Amino acid sequence: FQQKSAMSHQTGIRASAELLESFNCAKTTDTIRLIKVTIEDESLVASQMCDVQGDYKSDFSFLASTLKDKEPCYVFFRLDSKNASGYDFVFVAWSPDFSHVKSKMLYAATKATVKTAFGKQYIKAELYGTVLPDVTFEAYEKHLASEAAPPPLTMEELEKEEIRHAETHADISIASRQQIATGVAFPTEQNAIDALNALKSGKITYVQLSLDLENELVTLARKDNLGIDDVAAAIPDDHARYHVFNYKHSHEGDNIESIVFVYSCPGYHCSVKERMMYSSCKAPLIDVVENQASVPIAKKLEISEAAEFTQEWLYDTLHPAKVVFKQDFKRPQRPGKGGRRLIRGKK
């Protein structure tokens, strides 16, 4: 049990005196390009050393020549740059796919030991390789680019970043639109106003409005006499839209006409800018529909896909089921009047 526990934490393998001397020589002189370190007889030893031939880019090919297909090892490759302590080094942990599992575990457990013996302050980068393409100069450059890249963002963080960028670079023109507290008000084209008036007078039942983002206008996309199923088919699945629909139906024996305003936005199928602008223009457009066109809106709704726009959903939204009050069950009182009384027995 003690042997297994020691293996899982530390192998007990230490650097030999010769290896420590080679480390010091590599860190203090300009002649050594790389040191290959292996485990032999439960000791870390320098099994191979290569001298400097050119700059570190041309000498990087030496690294692959020191590696074997079935033997794990460590390699300290010296760069031409320096830090406050001395030359910078790349630490390579080589663990080929075809090596024995026991060897892989041994080298993995000893990695921290060899890095400490060398001096972690000298290690600028680390590479882990199982095949030769993992330890080429191109792989080293990709590693540096990955380290320098910003951290990955979640979808929510990426969307917020794009919205922030769009807001920062927005081209706001007094003549084209008005910034108000509840959103951005684009001018509405006259043919769209005429279509809303036609819907109000009963000539048509459906008006679809869209945003011309380039010219900053609310435009008429479609007007027609449609039933609820036809409206669902008219809702795009790749762009946001506004819909004004006169829903003719019966409720509790009465024939009713309810005009609803529906904002449809198909999630990530349209751009962040489009979603942001449609969301910002919604409230000002509702104000135009209700006040300028005098269309009475019974309900303002939002959907993310056309499949949501159904007869049952719209009816239940306009006429939610009434909750009948249900009285809680009360336990009946025991026979007799008043509370319980204690009766003393006769002495």
Image (tube, rainbow, N blue to C red):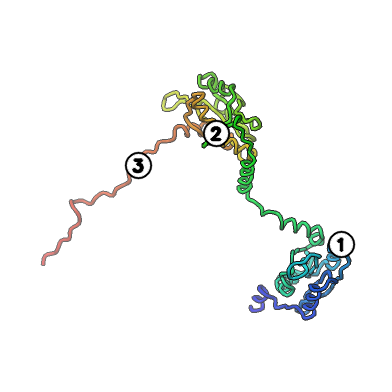
Q: Is residue 37 visible?
A: no
Residue 80 position within the rendered picture, expressed as x and y whole percent measured from the top left: 81, 65
Select label 2 or label 3 by which is in front.
2
- Measure the C-alpha gap from mark 3 to mark 1: 85 Å
Quadrant in the rendering for residue 341: bottom left
Quarter of the figure that contains the C terminus = bottom left
Q: Amino acid at mark 1?
A: Ser
Residue that numbered label 1 is attached to: 58
Precedes in sequence: disc 2 or disc 1: 1
Q: Between disc 3 and disc 1, whose residue precedes?
A: 1
Q: Are marks 2 and 3 in contact (CB under 8 Å)?
A: no
Quadrant that contains the N terminus:
bottom right
Residue 261 location (% of width, % of height): 52, 30
The disc label shown at residue 282, or none = 2
Q: Which sits in the foreground, 137 or 38?
A: 137
Q: Position of residue 300 (x, y in %)?
A: 50, 33
136 lies left or right of 301: right
Position of 88 relative to 318 (above/below): below
Left or right: 244 in relation to 165: left
- The image's mark for residue 326 is 3
Tell me which numbered mark, 2 or 3, is placed earlier along the sequence: 2
